[in-house]
Structure formats: structure tokens, C-alpha cells
Image (tube, rainbow, N blue to C red):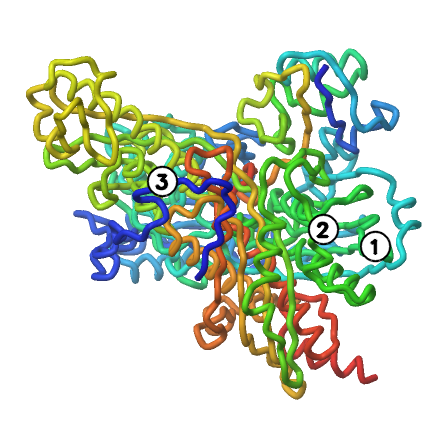
């Protein structure tokens, strides 16, 4: 099962657990399954049908451009990290 | 400059790694290159923007009647001419944008939020008439208390800039108005246990001032609104597609109606990603009866009203064991966002400890509004502030542990398979290689002698970014290849992209004719930022080379009446048995084999390959005056594969120069009412050639496995270490730990006096 790193500000949902294993073939499915385990967590990660702009998702070490649609393998690591913003546009990794 | 290759089996390239003449060189050195301010169109009007003299005030009314009646004036606009866009996050191609904030920054609606905030604009037959008319616009303000300090802004009793703003903590909103737009956190391990395990603990506060990107060319925009609603914009921007999208969203115009033509650019460094003038020029053009309107900022406008990067407050604590292993870190970062949310505090949080293996960490970051210009990206946004704090404390740990600073970093530094503090695992990276190269450098090997002289070391990290890029090419009958990309050329990327196409085709770089195309002429391409252009647009060019090659093999097969898989192609020569034909010879015969050969490709790579750097600097400090003289500087950086080594060196040297300015001289100075008092090059002190020695560069090549040629971005990481490296050198010269940027002579003298008691 993919391992998901839980952002520290959301660990109240997981009783302090820093990572959890959940099923899912895409980031979206992983989040939906997280929601089943920890009701309310999806709303903190997503704004409607997309990731919150302040969050970037890293799958297996790479910042995903497909975000919720990104495929996830059984052995994948998924991390939700702070999006790197920098002014007018809240962009990833820009300058 | 020297290059150290860390490839196990180095690939042999024909073009990559060489230094061909840059394609735009002649135009640049002869002054023929066309910049935005060079635009002159029939019937063109000149625009002027009226700016707020106050840092924080409510706009009670704006009376433009006198300006409108002034002879020669053709249009006056205010925020009332803009659509009343709602406060929502819009996904545009490059990221997300709060439309209301962006719109209100372009022209203030209800409040002005910083000195220089645009309030109205005039278009007239010449610039003088426009300036005179702008002075006739009457604006009545109700003054509000300015909020100028990031820590004051965070207090409960602070004046509030945006009454509808609530602190966001990953989707959880605060219950009352606040200047803290966001709170972010990274937490791993157990810092209490980590600090208990430490033999040495250091802790300090750090303060950094707001600084500007300092590009030479001011912002400018010319817009032509046509009666049919089609709009053309000529401007100085890092990303033409971003200008198109932002203008479209703010003015609620379909993107298909807008064509953006990027002119040559005189520097950007992140400051020319967001729009300022473009929507205003469009409004003025439309209101003036479809006359073209050009607006060019003055230097004062640039400094007062375009995105600087954040000033910041940081409090950092680090612990290490007696054998030099970092046991725990704790940090608080509060970054000034300026007037609207969006400081690079997230970047700072990630950069701060990224070079090191750390098991126990707690990092809190705050994005804080103050009555200063909305911040924009600046070269490794947020990174220099954070590294100033972390790398200074590492030097202090080394001092207490009596360890060599490079040996300490080698002991704690990250490598492939290690985990970044915020979670992800590193792929192939070259941090340790930069440390080893620094350690073995002639600079580090040579002891520094003399009174009041000191040597400082600091390291830095930057994520780098991939993003979306497109490229199109066509083979010409003379054997050249025309290449169009949407990447604005800031640091020589026409050539570094062309070289990747040339390498793929096995022909000289000089045979490629690269051009920067407008938004109607090439596929979507993100801006030149994030150290992404040579990486991603270069990759698109590589993909184009594969497509062209496949087609050309078919054409050669037609000529030789054989199957394409019977043909070899190497070093620009097609061969089949004993028959041979050069690329140029085949290009001449395209008409007889089916006509033009063209190809386009688009990419969105994700493995951008992080960059690391280690810098060494020697300084001499005059204890009487506090003046710091840089004696020697060596920058070491992992560039992946350096496509054009001289450009890589230029990026490294440029980052150092800007970082030294940030370290020693540059800062925004406001009076107690929030008025910027040093909005000129004379008073905003950037380094000049006399302030800097020759900067030695050592390029370490640890190829990025996520790129066909091993490229990593190189533009941003060199600005991360300099402030800390210089601060550490000052300490070793005179025994004073500086915790404020810039480290001006006055501040150094004050610290020395305090040290003496």
C-alpha cells in the first residue's frame, strides 16, 4: 500500500501518526481513502475538486504536475508539502 | 572557472559543454535588440500611473475631471474601469492567483496598501502632458496607521490591512481578521529528545530587510486594443503566456483575444512574472478610442511599486552532538508578504535545513501582510533569508565544536537516498561533491593571513522546477534549422536550448536559428523562472530533434530507395552502405521527398533535479569604519551537465553579486509613515564592480538522471549562500556575529562598540 506522509498541521486527525498506509491508485483515491479513515482531512487538503493552492504533492520524490490525477504505485511514497510561493502568483518552484 | 565531472562514464558530446557564439550576441552588443521601451507605433499615446503617497489609507473619492479635461489627454482610468472580480483563486496555466488581490494591486480600489500603490492612470499625446494631467487627479484619503514591521503586524492589536483576511492553516481558517495570511509547519522526530542529546546548542534571532531584484530595465508595457476586441501587448516579461492569462483574468477577456509579444528583457530575477502595467495599458488603449498606449516605469516606480522580496524575522535553534552530528533544529520564520498574501516563506522553510540529515525538526512559517509593496519572486525565493540564519548557526556550532566548517557539513550533508526534512527522499544529488570540491579548491587550501581578515563558508539548496515548455522547428533548405520557443531569453537560453537541438541532430549550434516567439506563434510555455528554461525548454528541443531525425531518416530512405531502418545517422551524416549524405545535403533535397520537414514538441518534466552550492569568501573588515571588503570569493555548484559552461559561470557569479549586495548594502528604507525614502539607485545601494573581486567558479557536474542530457537548473541556488558566507567571514575577521541584513558599516561598528562594552 502507498505510504502517505501526513503534514504536521493535520496530525490531529491521525492521532499524531506521521505517516499512514492507505489504498489508492491515484493521489485522489489516496485522499478519498484517507477521508474514510480520518473524516474531515480531505477538506483540509483539497478545495473542492483540486488540491489547495498552498499544498504541493510529491510522489516518489518528484513534485507532481498531475496532482490529484497522479498515478500511485503500491510502493509509492506520497507527501503533501508546502507549495513554494513567491509573490504575485502562488507558484511552485518559481523565481 | 573549472569544471569537475562526477559521471562514472562521461558521455561525449559534440555541442553540449562547448561555448558557441550566442545567437543574439550581435544584436545585443550593437544596441539593435528591441526592448519594450523601444516600441513606437503610429498614433501612440503615453501613459502615466498616479501612485499613492501614503502607505495605508482608505480612498474616499477620486476626481479625474480636471485630468480628463486637460488638453492632450485621451483617457483616464481608475479601478472603477476594471471588472469587480471576486475574491477567488483562479487556476491559470502557471499556478494559482487570487484575482481580487491581483486586480487591486494593479489599481487600488478601496484602500491603498503601500507607498506607490497605483491609483489611477492617464494616457495623453506625450509623456509631459500625461504627467501634468496625472497631477490634476484629486484623491481624498482617510489615513490609516501604517503597519511596517512583521512582528508588529502579527500582534492582535495591529491595524489590519485586509479586513476579510483570516489566517489559513492548511484549510483551517482563523475566526477573526489578521495580517497573518498563513501558518505552515514542518515537524519530524522529537525536538525535545534531540536537544537533550545535544552537547552544544546555539540559538539566535535574525532580521533581514526587504530588497529588490534590481533588474536594469524598468517594467514597461504597450497595448493596442483593436475595434474588434483583439488586443496586442508588447512588454518586458519573464513569461508572455503568464501576462496573457493574468491580463485575461483581471480584465475578464478571453485569452484568445490577447496576443503578447515578449520583447528583449533587461533582467527579471523573478520580478517580471506578475503584471503591473499591462492591464492598465489595455484599459487606456480601449478608452482612448483604440490608440496604442505605452507605459514605462521610472526607477522610483520600480522600487516603490514592483515586487521586492520579503524582509523577515527568523528565530532559529540548533543542537549538535560532541562529534558534530546535528541532533535537532527548531525555527520560526515570519516573512513580509507586502500588501497581499504570497511571501516565499514556504520556500524559506524548505531551503533552511534541506542540505542536512536531520531527524528532529520543528519549523513554523508565517506569511504576514505589511504596508509595503506586494512581494514577488526573487531568485530562490525565500532561500537567502533562511540560509543566512541556518548557515550562521552552523558556523557557530563548528566554532564551539572546534570543527572545520566543511568537515561538519560533509558529516551532516545529504546524498541520494536521504530524506529531506519535509519528507521526500532525494534522488541523485551533488551536495557532498560541492563540499569536496570546495575543500580541495585552491582558495580553501590557501590559508588567509592578515589582521581583520576572515574566511566564511556557507552552503545552499534550491528545488529547481520543471514546468511546461514547447518548441517548434523547421528544416531550411540551406541545412539550418529554425527553432521557435516561448521562453524569454534572460541568461542566454536561446543558445542553451539551441545547443540541445543541435546535439540531438548532430549539427553545429550555429546551424540553429533560435527565436523567442509570441503567444500566438508557439505552444504554451511557462515563464523563464524556477531555473527551468534550459532544463525544460531544452528538453522540448531535444524531443523536437528526435522527431526531425525520424522524418529525415524517412526522407533519406526515399532518396536511396530503401527502408529507413537501413540508414544510420551519426554526427550529422546519413549513411547507408557506402552511400553518405550530410544533413545539409539532405535538407537541399526535401522538396523532392515530400516538402517541408517540421516538428513540434511539448513537455512537462517533473524530475527537475535539486541544486546545491557551497561558497567560500574572504573579507577584510575595517574596524574603524565597519566597511567590509570582499577579498576573494569562490562559488562551487552542482550544475548537473553544464550545457554552456560560461553561462553557468555567469549565473553563479551573478547570484553571488546579488547575494553580496543583499548581505552588505541593500535594503528598503521607510520613514515612520511608511514612505520609501531610498527609491533610486543612488540611495538603494547595489554592488558595483568596485565592490566585488573576480568570483571564481567551480562547476561540479553530477548529471540529473531526470533529464536526457543531465541538466539541472543553475540560476537560483547561487544567491542562497552569500549572506551567510559573508556573515561568517565577518565573524572570523573581527569576532562579531552579525544577525541583521544588510551588514552595513554602521551596524558593524555598532556591534563592535557593543562588544567592547
- Residue A22's image quarter? top right
Could you confirm whether marks 2 and 3 are on the same chain? yes
Give above or below for B38 relative to A91: below
| Residue at 31% over, 28% down | B544
Which is more foreground, mark 1 or mark 3? 1
Q: Which residue is mark 2?
A: B334
Q: Which part of the image, by quadrant, shows the N terminus of chain B? A: bottom left
Please tell me which residue lies in front, B1 or B394: B1
Q: Which residue is mark 1?
A: B320
Read off the chain for label 1. Answer: B
Q: Residues within 10 Å of mark 1 (few under 14, many from 20)?
A: many
Read off the chain for label 3. Answer: B
> x, y percentage for residue B737?
74, 70
C-beta proximity under 8 Å, tags 2 and 3: no
> x, y percentage for residue B636?
54, 57
Q: Which residue is mark 3?
A: B487
| Residue at 54% over, 22% down | A66
Amino acid at each position: 500500500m502507498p505510504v502517505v506522509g501526513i503534514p504536521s498541521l493535520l496530525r490531529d486527525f491521525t492521532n499524531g501518526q506521521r505517516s499512514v498506509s492507505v489504498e489508492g491508485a491515484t493521489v485522489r483515491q489516496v485522499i478519498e481513502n484517507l477521508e474514510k479513515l480520518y473524516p474531515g482531512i480531505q477538506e483540509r487538503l483539497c478545495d473542492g475538486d483540486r488540491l489547495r493552492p498552498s499544498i504541493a504533492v510529491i510522489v516518489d520524490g518528484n513534485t507532481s504536475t498531475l496532482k490529484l490525477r497522479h498515478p500511485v504505485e503500491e510502493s509509492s511514497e506520497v507527501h503533501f508539502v508546502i507549495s513554494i510561493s513567491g509573490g504575485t502568483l502562488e507558484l511552485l518552484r518559481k523565481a | 572557472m573549472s569544471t569537475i565531472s562526477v559521471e562514472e562514464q562521461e558521455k561525449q558530446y559534440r555541442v553540449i559543454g562547448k561555448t558557441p557564439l550566442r545567437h543574439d550576441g550581435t544584436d545585443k552588443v550593437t544596441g539593435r535588440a528591441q526592448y519594450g521601451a523601444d516600441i513606437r507605433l503610429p498614433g501612440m499615446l503615453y501613459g502615466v500611473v498616479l501612485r499613492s503617497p501614503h502607505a495605508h489609507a482608505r480612498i474616499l473619492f477620486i476626481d479625474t475631471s480636471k485630468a480628463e479635461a486637460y488638453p492632450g489627454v485621451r483617457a483616464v482610468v481608475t479601478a472603477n474601469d476594471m471588472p469587480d472580480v471576486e475574491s477567488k483563486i483562479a487556476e491559470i496555466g502557471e499556478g494559482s492567483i487570487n484575482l481580487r488581490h491581483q486586480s487591486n494591486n494593479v489599481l487600488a480600489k478601496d484602500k491603498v496598501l503601500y507607498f506607490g500603490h497605483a491609483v489611477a492612470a492617464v494616457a495623453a499625446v506625450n509623456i509631459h502632458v500625461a504627467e501634468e494631467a496625472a497631477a490634476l487627479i484629486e484623491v481624498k484619503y482617510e489615513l490609516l496607521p501604517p503597519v511596517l514591521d512583521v512582528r508588529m503586524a502579527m500582534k492582535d492589536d495591529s491595524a489590519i490591512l485586509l479586513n476579510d483576511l483570516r489566517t489559513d492553516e492548511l484549510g483551517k481558517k482563523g475566526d477573526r481578521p489578521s495580517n497573518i495570511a498563513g501558518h505552515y509547519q514542518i515537524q519530524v522526530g522529537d525536538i525535545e529528545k534531540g536537544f537533550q542529546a545535544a552537547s552544544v546548542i546555539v540559538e539566535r534571532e535574525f532580521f533581514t530587510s526587504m530588497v529588490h531584484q534590481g533588474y536594469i530595465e524598468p517594467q514597461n508595457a504597450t497595448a493596442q486594443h483593436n475595434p474588434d476586441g483583439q488586443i496586442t501587448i508588447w512588454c518586458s516579461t519573464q513569461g508572455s503566456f503568464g501576462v496573457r492569462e493574468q491580463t485575461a483574468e483581471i480584465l475578464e477577456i478571453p485569452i484568445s483575444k490577447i496576443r503578447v509579444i515578449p520583447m528583449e528583457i533587461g533582467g527579471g530575477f523573478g520580478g517580471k512574472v506578475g503584471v503591473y502595467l499591462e492591464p492598465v495599458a489595455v484599459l487606456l488603449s480601449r478608452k482612448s478610442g483604440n490608440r496604442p498606449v505605452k507605459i514605462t516605469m521610472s526607477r522610483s516606480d520600480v522600487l516603490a511599486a514592483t515586487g521586492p522580496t520579503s524582509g523577515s524575522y527568523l528565530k532559529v535553534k540548533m543542537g549538535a552532538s560532541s562529534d558534530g552530528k546535528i541532533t535537532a533544529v527548531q525555527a520560526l520564520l515570519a516573512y513580509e508578504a507586502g500588501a497581499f498574501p504570497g511571501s516565499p516563506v514556504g520556500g524559506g522553510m524548505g531551503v533552511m535545513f534541506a542540505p542536512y540529515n536531520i531527524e528532529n525538526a520543528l519549523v513554523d512559517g508565517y506569511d504576514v501582510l505589511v504596508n509595503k509593496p506586494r512581494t514577488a519572486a526573487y531568485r530562490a525565493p525565500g532561500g537567502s533569508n533562511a540560509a543566512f540564519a541556518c548557515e550562521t548557526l552552523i558556523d557557530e556550532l563548528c566554532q564551539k565544536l572546534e570543527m572545520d566548517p566543511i568537515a561538519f557539513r560533509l558529516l551532516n550533508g545529504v546524498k541520494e537516498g536521504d530524506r529531506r526534512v519535509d519528507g521526500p527522499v532525494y534522488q541523485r544529488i551533488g551536495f557532498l561533491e560541492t563540499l569536496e570540491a570546495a575543500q580541495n579548491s585552491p582558495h580553501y587550501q590557501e590559508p588567509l593571513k592578515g589582521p581583520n581578515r576572515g574566511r566564511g563558508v556557507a552552503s545552499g539548496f534550491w528545488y529547481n522546477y520543471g514546468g511546461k515548455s514547447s518548441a517548434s522547428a523547421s528544416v531550411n533548405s540551406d541545412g539550418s534549422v529554425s527553432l521557435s520557443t516561448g521562453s524569454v531569453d534572460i541568461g542566454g537560453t536561446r543558445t542553451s536550448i539551441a545547443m540541445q537541438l543541435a546535439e540531438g541532430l548532430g549539427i553545429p549550434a550555429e546551424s540553429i536559428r533560435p527565436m523567442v516567439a509570441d503567444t500566438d506563434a508557439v505552444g504554451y510555455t511557462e515563464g523563464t523562472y524556477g531555473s527551468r528554461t534550459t532544463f525544460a525548454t531544452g528538453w522540448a528541443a531535444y524531443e523536437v530533434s528526435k522527431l526531425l531525425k525520424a522524418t529525415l531518416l524517412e526522407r533519406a530512405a526515399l532518396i536511396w530507395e530503401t527502408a529507413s531502418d537501413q540508414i544510420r545517422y551519426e554526427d550529422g551524416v546519413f549513411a547507408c552502405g557506402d552511400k553518405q549524405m550530410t544533413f545539409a545535403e539532405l535538407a537541399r533535397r526535401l522538396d523532392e521527398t515530400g516538402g517541408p520537414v517540421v516538428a513540434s514538441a511539448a513537455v512537462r518534466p517533473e524530475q527537475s533535479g535539486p541544486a546545491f552550492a557551497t561558497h567560500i569568501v574572504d573579507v577584510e573588515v575595517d574596524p574603524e569604519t565597519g566597511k567590509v571588503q570582499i577579498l576573494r570569493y569562490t562559488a562551487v555548484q552542482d550544475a548537473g551537465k553544464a550545457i554552456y559552461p560560461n553561462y553557468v559561470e555567469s549565473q553563479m557569479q551573478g547570484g553571488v553579486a546579488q547575494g553580496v549586495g543583499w548581505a552588505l548594502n541593500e535594503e528598503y528604507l521607510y520613514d515612520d509613515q511608511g514612505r520609501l525614502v531610498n527609491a533610486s539607485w543612488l540611495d538603494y545601494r547595489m554592488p558595483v564592480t568596485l565592490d566585488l573581486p573576480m568570483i571564481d567558479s567551480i562547476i561540479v557536474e553530477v548529471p540529473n538522471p531526470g533529464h536526457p542530457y543531465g541538466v539541472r537548473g543553475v540560476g537560483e541556488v547561487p544567491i542562497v549562500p552569500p549572506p551567510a558566507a559573508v556573515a561568517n567571514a565577518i565573524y572570523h575577521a573581527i569576532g562579531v556575529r552579525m544577525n541583521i541584513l544588510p551588514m552595513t558599516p554602521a551596524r558593524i561598528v555598532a556591534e563592535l562598540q557593543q562588544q567592547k562594552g
